[in-house]
Amino acid sequence: MNLKIALLAGDGIGPEVTNEAVNVLNTVAAAGGHTFTYTSLLIGGAAIDAHGTPLPEETLKETLASDAAFLGAVGDNKFNSLPPSERPEAGLLKIRAELGGFANLRPATAYKALADNSPLRPEITEGVDILFVRELLGGLYFGQPRAWDKTTDRAHNTMVYTRHEVERVAKIAFDIAAKRDKKKVTSVDKANVLECSQLWRAVVTEVAKDYPTVTLEHQLVDSMAIHLMNRPRDFDVVLTENLFGDILSDESGVITGSLGMLPSATLGGKVNLYEPVHGSAPDIAGQGKANPIGAILTAALVLRHSAGLNAEAKIIEDAVVKVLEAGYRTTDIARGDIAGQQTVSTSKMGQLVLDQVTAEL
Ligand code: NAI
Ligand code: MG
């Protein structure tokens, strides 16, 4: 198959981890006779350096003409004095909005080999495999009107959802759940207080009727925050609106043990956008310390959601497990007090996963 990928490596550790992800994609392409072509485009700090703007026209145009967009990270702290609208992150927010993806998928997987990296007890995290489906373009983050009136010091934001917005993201969540082992959707809202949540709950319940094989449960967001830590294994697909999804998916990072391990995919727009969850990590950029696993697992999501190469995606995910089980760690997941571990660089970790993938293809 042919896949044209817009490569938005960004700044900070973005280019370092993107490089490892592309190596893995290339290996899968070579083994399967697929043609993946890449267009390297500037975004964030790298684009400000070259063109004075975090999202050049050409980057947007070329990305919209691609089959998938892979983004490393943006946010070099040398731009910290700039106003928000001119900072690297403005490029990221703009491209997300322009691509129009509304379903943000964030898997939270517990790795047995990293059980000691989580503050939760191993018997709580063992076997956890949650997929958050977070609505990304609605709710409080985009609702109008919004303002901070400096004369009265009164500020307001507006939470808005339409039936259409809820329906389309719910369908994606149920489509995915129907193909997973547990076949369960947990819809999270605050229906005891918010009208938006009452609409959300009503629409999700209707959508569920088209998926008889999938179990639906509703949870209120405040108690869900506790359930996630107490009994994370009970959840499969967690469907929720923008703000709740932002908070709960970050909370679930506790289960995995490092931000550097988490991938994401945003579906439903003109072009799917794939990015590791972490930022540009200026504190470790350029030192070969970045964990490339989040980016490599993001490459697996590209294969699954933009290429239909499910078996290859699984091979990558299994390769990560094997490399961790063999004791290899980047600095963020290394525990010096545990025997049998070896700390490796970004490129070494990438190579180890690559070798494992090559052996399985
Ligand atoms: P961050 O995710 O860049 O870093 C947080 C901490 O986690 C740091 O100590 C960092 O060293 C560590 N870390 C992150 N990714 C890692 C990896 N792959 N391997 C090893 N360690 C890793 O978040 P922070 O520090 O809050 O933000 C830094 C910059 O990144 C800011 O300018 C922020 O706005 C931007 N940012 C960009 C995002 C994106 O491009 N999608 C997302 C989040 C933040
Ligand atoms: Mg967040």
Image (cartoon, grey):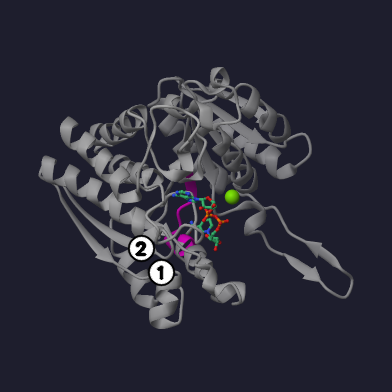
The residue singled out by tag 2 in the image is 8
Kindly tell me whether residue 280 is visible in this rendering. Answer: yes
| Earlier residue among tags 2 and 1 | 2
The residue positioned 63% from the left and 34% from the top of the image is 188
Q: Is residue 1 above or below residue 285?
A: above
* Viewer-closest of 235 and 21: 21
**Contact, mark 2 vs mark 1 (Cβ under 8 Å):** yes
Quadrant location of residue 4?
bottom left
| Looking at the image, residue 267 lies above or below residue 38 | above
Asked whether 184 falls inside the magenta stretch, the response is: no
Residue placed at 33% from the left, 55% from the top?
Answer: 18
Q: Nearer the viewer, residue 338 or 169?
A: 338
Residue 106 image position (x, y, % from top left): 48, 41
Give the image quarter of residue 269: bottom left
Q: Is residue 98 magenta?
A: yes
Mark 2: few, some, or many residues within 10 Å (few <14, many ≥20)? Answer: many
Q: Nearer the viewer, residue 30 or 281?
A: 281
Can residue 209 be seen in this snapshot?
Answer: no
Q: Which amino acid, mark 2?
A: Leu
* Count of numbered marks: 2
User: Which residues lie in the magenta part?
Assistant: 96-104
Dividing the image into 4 quarters, which one contains the C terminus?
A: top left
Query: Residue 326 location, x and y as percent?
Result: 32, 28
Label 2 and label 1: CA atoms lie apart by 6 Å
For the point 17% across and 37% down, the residue is: 358
Residue at the limit of the structure toward the right, as seen here: 152
Query: In screen coordinates, is 315 left or right of 95?
Result: left
Q: Amino acid at mark 1?
A: Ile
Task: Give residue 206's mark.
Answer: none
Q: Nearer the viewer, residue 115 or 95?
A: 115
Q: Residue at 62% of width from left, 59% of height from top?
A: 142
Find residue 43 and name its label.
1
